[in-house]
Image: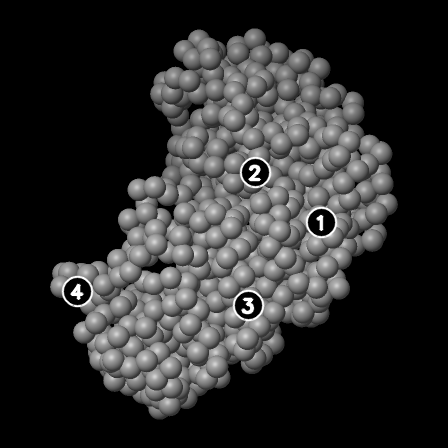
Amino acid sequence: MLAAIRDKAEAGKRLDRAEGLWLLTEAPLLELGSLAQDARFRRIPEKRVTFVIDSNPNYTNVCITDCQFCAFYRKPGDPEAWTLTVEEVMAKVEFAAQRGATTVLLQGGHNPALPLDYYLDLVSETRRRFPAVTPHFFTASEICTMAEVSGKSVPEILAALKAAGQRTLPGGGAEILSERVRKRIEPKKGGPRAWLDVHREAHRQGFKSTATMMYGHVETAEDVLDHLDSIRDLQDEHGGFTAFVPWSFKPGNTLLEKWIKQYKGPNAYLRMLAVSRLYLDNFPHVQASWFSEGKRTGQVALHWGADDFGGTLFEENVHAAADYVNKTTVDEVVALIREAGFTPAQRTTTYEILKAH
Amino acid sequence: MSLVLTASPLLRDRRLLAVWEKVQAGRRLSREDGLLLFETEDLHGLGRMADIAKSRLHGEHVFFVLNRYINPTNVCVLSCSFCDFARKKGEDGAFENSIEDVLGMIKPGTREAHIVGGHHPDWPFEYYERMVEAIHAARPETQIKAFTAAEIDFFWRRWKIEPREALTRLKKAGLHSMPGGGAEVFSPRLQKLLKYTGKADAARWLEIHGIAHELGIKTNATMLYGHVETMAERVDHLLRLREQQDKSGGFITFIPLAYQVGTTRLVPRQTPPTDDLRTIAASRLLLDNFPHIEAYWVMIGEETASVALHFGASDVNGTLEDEKIAHMALAESPAGLATEQILRLIRDAGKIPVERDALYNVVKVWN
C-alpha cells in the first residue's frame, strides 16, 4: 500500500478513500511523515516555513448554540457573559496593529442581540483605521447568525461584508464535517452543509478562506475522511481555500469532558497533518498549530507535511499582555522555525510572503 | 520479524543506504557512519532505521518503572557550569536530608529509588552506606539505584575509599544498580571549558562502571547534549560507551540528557525536539550492544518522548516522583507523572507499556 501511495503521490494522482483510510489507521508514522514531506517539497521546493503576525481577539462570548466541546461561551444573561462595543474591538485591533500584526482573526459567539450593522462596522472601521490589518473576521456559523438576525440570505451577508472591505474568512467551526458527529456534539449548529455552503458562496464571491478540523472527540476515521472529502471536493469548485488547519479537541471545562478526559497526543497530530498534506492535493498550505499542540510538537510537525507555523497570536487579553512578551513572541516564532531546520518567512493573511528572515 | 527486517525505511538521503545495509546485516557502525547520522537531514529515514533496530530487540514493548527520585543533598564541592542544582554549604536553597527524611520519601510499593546527590564535603561514606542499608531494611520491595560514578569517585577523592570497596560495601548494604549520571560529555576540551575537571573524567567514569559490572551491579549511561559540544564529541562519547560495554557488558540503558538552559545559559535556548529525536535514533544505531535507549521525558517533555518511541527509544524511565535536578534548571515538564500519564505517553505512540523493576525484570505488561 505504501509503495502504491508513494507512486500515486509522485505522479500527482489523487488518493482515494481506501488509501486515505489506510494512511489514517495503519501507515507507519515515519514513512507517512516522509511521504508528506515529499509532497510538501513538491509543492514548495524551498525550505521555507511561513508565519503571520496576528492576533485573535473575540467580540462576545454570548452564544445560544451550546456546543458540547466549547468552554468559551456563556448563555445570554449569564453573569460572565460579555459583548464588546465596536470601539472596544477597535482598541484590540489597534493593540495588534501597533505590534505589527497584519491579520486580526476576530470571532465570537452566536449572539442574537447583535444587529448586522455591528458586524459591518467592525469590518469597515478596521479597514478605515488600520489599513495594514486584514480583517480575517467571522466563521461560517457567525455568518449564518447574521443571516438569521437580519432576515437576509448568506450570499447577501457575504456581499455586504465584502462591500465593507472583508476579503477573507477564517475556517473555524468546521469541527468534523460529518452529520453523525455534529448531531452528537453540536446539534444546534447545523450539519456539514451549513459550513460548506457558506465557504462555497464566499469562494464564489472571491473570498479566500481556510478550512479547519477539530479532531480527538467522538469521530471515527470514516468521519475524518468525510471531512477531508468534503473540503477537497469544495476546493475543486473554486479553489478558495488557502490552508488546512487541524487541531486536537481540548476537553477542559467542556460538557464533553465527562466522556473524553484527554486530548489526543502528538503522534495523532503528526499523523493528521501528514495525511491531510497527502490527501488534500488541491490545498496550497497545511498549517502546524504550535499554539494548540505545543511549541515543540509544532516544530516536529514541520517535518510531517506542514509548511506554515500559524500566527504569533498576540494575547487575547490586552490588559495582561506586555509589549515585552509580544516582541519575544515574534522572535520566538522565528527561532522555533529556524531550529526546526527551516527558513522563516513572514506572510500575509493570504500567504503572500512579506519578509524573509 | 522477517517482515520488519525486509521493510524498506524509505531513505531520502541516499548516503544512509550503506548504513542501512549494515543495520540490516547486524554489522557495527563506524565513526563516519555516526557522524553521518548526526548530519543527515533525513530525520525520517534515520528514525525508521533506529525503530527497526529497536523492534528487533523489544518488538512493540516500551518499558517504564514506578520510581521515586531522591536527592539526599544538593550541597556540592563542584561548580560545573551546566548545573543549576548544586549549592554550597549554608547557601540559600541548600538542603541536607537525614536518613529518616529519605525513608519518609519512599512510599510502599515504590519499585525503584533513584538516588543521586551533590558531592558533600563532610558526609562520610558510612552515611551513604547506612542510608542504603536503612532503605533496604524499611522497604525491601524497593530496588535501590544509587550514586553516580562521579559520586563513587568522590568517595575516593574525599575519603580514600577505593571504588571497588565502596561498591562492594554498598552492594552488601542493599544497592541494586547504579545510575548513569556524571558522564556529561567525554571530552577533555569540554571538561575544561565547562569546569568539570574536578570530577571523574572519562577514563575514571568508565573504569568505575567496569568495576560495578564486574561486581554484578548493572548500570546506566548518559550523555549531556545540546550545549556547546560538537557532533564529533557526541559520536566519540557514544563510541567510548560502546567500547566499554564490549569489555564489561553491564550497561542496561543509555539516557541522552538534553541540557536545560535554566539560569546557567550555556546556550540561549534548549536544543529543539528534532535534535532529541536524532540523538535518540543515532544512539540506538551506534550503541548496538546496549539493551535500551531511553526517552527521558523530564528533559525533552512528554510529547517529544512519546514521538521518540518511533525513533528507537524503548524506555521512558518512570513516574519519577519529585524530580529536582532538571526542575531546578527550570525544566517545563511536571515534577513526576502519574502512572496513567506514563501509560498514555506510551500508548499514544501505539506501543505496549511494560512495567519493569530497576533491573528490567518485567512486572506487568499493560495490554
Spatial separation of the CA atoms under disc 1 and disc 2: 19 Å
Name the residue tied to disc 3.
A233
Q: Which marked residue is nearer to the observer: mark 2 or mark 3?
A: 3
Residues at marks 1 and 3 on the same chain: yes
Q: Position of residue A217 (x, y in %)?
A: 41, 48
Residue at 24%, 64% (x, y): give it: A63
Name the residue tied to disc 1.
A2
Q: Secondary structure at mark 3?
A: helix
Residue at 55%, 46% (x, y): give it: A267
Badge 3 local density, few (<14 within 10 Å), some, or many (20+)? few
Residues at marks 1 and 2 on the same chain: no
Q: Amino acid at mark 4?
A: Pro
> In this picture, is B240 found above or below A95?
above
Q: Position of residue A270 (x, y in %)?
A: 56, 52
Spatial separation of the CA atoms under disc 2 and disc 4: 44 Å
Residue at 71%, 60% (x, y): give it: A9
Badge 1 local density, few (<14 within 10 Å), some, or many (20+)? some
Spatial separation of the CA atoms under disc 2 and disc 3: 32 Å
Badge 2 local density, few (<14 within 10 Å), some, or many (20+)? some
Name the residue tied to disc 4.
A76
**Residue B31 visible, this orientation:** no
